[in-house]
Amino acid sequence: MTGATSGSLSSPVLVGRDTEAAWLDRTLSDLLEGRPHVVVISGEAGIGKTRLIEDCLARRARELRVLRGECLALGSGIPYLPFAAILRALVRQVPTTSLAALLGSARLELARLLPELAPATGVAPATTASGPTGADLD
């Protein structure tokens, strides 16, 4: 087809999710004020879960650092995959000097999962690789 676009098209306006968006905005405000939350958003495929989250986070992009990990289909057998993705994003966003403070006392254990964290631990990568390597988690 000539002139057809690839990918999906979506409205720039989030429709029918005002209540949910307002609740998520309040929750993000709480987070910014130091009150932690766990948020679980569930629903059938295609209902707009990702769109709701992306819309709310886009409005707060200047205030938040967002790290994202996703699971593969059930039965993939790759433990900790979303956490490895989140840590890799953190390594790309944060200077090594700040990374050690962010990871705190867990940094040595986390470096076992992800060798890219070794500079933040002060330990050579070879000595942190007693667990699965980052390549095993991709």
Image (spheres, rainbow, N blue to C red):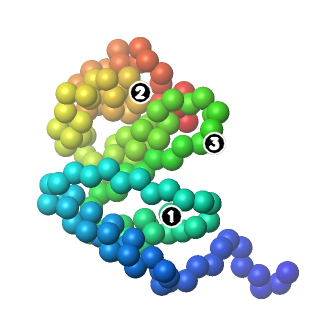
Work out whether residue 135 can be spotted: no
Q: Which residue is mark 2?
A: 113
Q: Residue furthest left?
A: 33
The mark nearer the N terminus, 2 or 1, is: 1
Residue at position x 33%, y 32% from top?
117
Q: x, y (%) of residue 18?
A: 40, 79
Label 2 is placed on what type of residue? Leu
Picture quadrant of residue 71? top right
Q: x, y (%) of residue 41?
A: 45, 57
Q: Quadrant of the C terminus?
A: top right
Q: Which residue is mark 1?
A: 49
| Mark 3, secondary structure of its residue | loop
**Number of on-image labels:** 3
Instruction: Report, in whole angstroms, how far the alpha carbon at label 1 lies from the one at label 3.
Output: 17 Å
Residue situated in front as seen by the camera: 123 or 51: 51
The reply to whether discs 2 and 1 touch (Cβ–Cβ < 8 Å) is: no
Above or below residue 63? Residue 75 is above
The mark nearer the N terminus, 3 or 2, is: 3
Work out whether residue 119 can be spotted: yes
Label 3 is placed on what type of residue? Ala
Q: Which residue is mark 3?
A: 73
Above or below residue 72? Residue 56 is below
